């Protein structure tokens, strides 16, 4: 028996589609939605202009270059936002030009997009709107690892010490 499964992706309401706040911060109603950027070798994405710098929000709408992956709410959303705002997540200035986006986060409060973050894993840099003051440098190796684990894009495996004879 064939089953039809429908998946409702994120929709930004037509009236006041994106209402960016003055800063990205956590609240009890925070939701973080994670999107992945389509691979540059996948050229058949309708409406996706791969020649332009990729951002999750283009023309006040979600770019067709991104695919919805997952959502985090309440405590998980708060942890992710707090990690993004933590100065210890970043180090030094950006050393090279960086524009490729691999993942993007939409920050919502009460179902309204209040901010977004584009993440480049090649140069370990976040581009956000509104800007996150702490994110003026690159992600530290630890900050990058913690973010990817929190977003469940990698699985954290415990280090096991070798057995002694």
Image: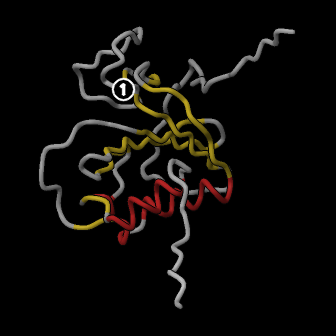
Measuring from the top left, give residue 44's x and y in whole percent.
Answer: 38, 9
Element type at mark 1: loop
Q: Residue at x 60, y 22 (%)?
A: 13
Q: Read off the residue under disc 1.
A: 39
The residue furthest front is 165
Q: Which residue does the image show at 32% across and 37% down from the upper left?
A: 101
In the picture as drawn, the residue positioned furthest to the right comes out as 1
Q: Position of residue 86 (x, y in %)?
A: 41, 67
Residue 120: image quadrant is top left
With 12 as the anchor, is 125 left or right in this view? left
Q: Quadrant of residue 48?
A: top left
**Location of residue 37 (image quadrant):** top left
Q: Position of residue 9 (x, y in %)?
A: 62, 24
Q: Residue at x 38, y 59 (%)?
A: 144
The quarter of the rendered structure image containing the N terminus is top right
Q: Residue furthest bottom?
A: 165
Question: Badge 1: few (under 14), some or many (20 or more) residues near its Cα, within 10 Å?
Answer: few
Tell me: residue 132, above or below residue 63: below
């Amino acid at each position: 028996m064939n089953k039809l499964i429908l998946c409702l992706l994120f929709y930004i309401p037509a009236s006041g589609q994106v209402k960016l706040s003055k800063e990205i911060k956590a609240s009890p109603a925070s939701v973080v939605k994670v999107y992945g950027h389509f691979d540059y070798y996948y050229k058949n994405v309708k409406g996706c202009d791969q020649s332009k710098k990729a951002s999750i929000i283009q023309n006040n709408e979600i770019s067709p270059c991104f695919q919805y992956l997952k959502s985090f709410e309440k405590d998980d959303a708060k942890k992710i936002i707090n990690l993004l705002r933590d100065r210890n997540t970043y180090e030094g200035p950006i050393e090279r030009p960086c524009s490729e986006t691999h993942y993007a986060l939409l920050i919502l409060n009460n179902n309204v997009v209040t901010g977004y973050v584009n993440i480049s894993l090649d140069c370990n840099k976040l581009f956000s709107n509104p800007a996150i003051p702490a994110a003026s440098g690159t992600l530290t190796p630890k900050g990058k690892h913690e973010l990817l684990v929190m977003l469940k894009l990698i699985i954290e495996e415990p280090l096991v010490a070798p057995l002694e004879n």
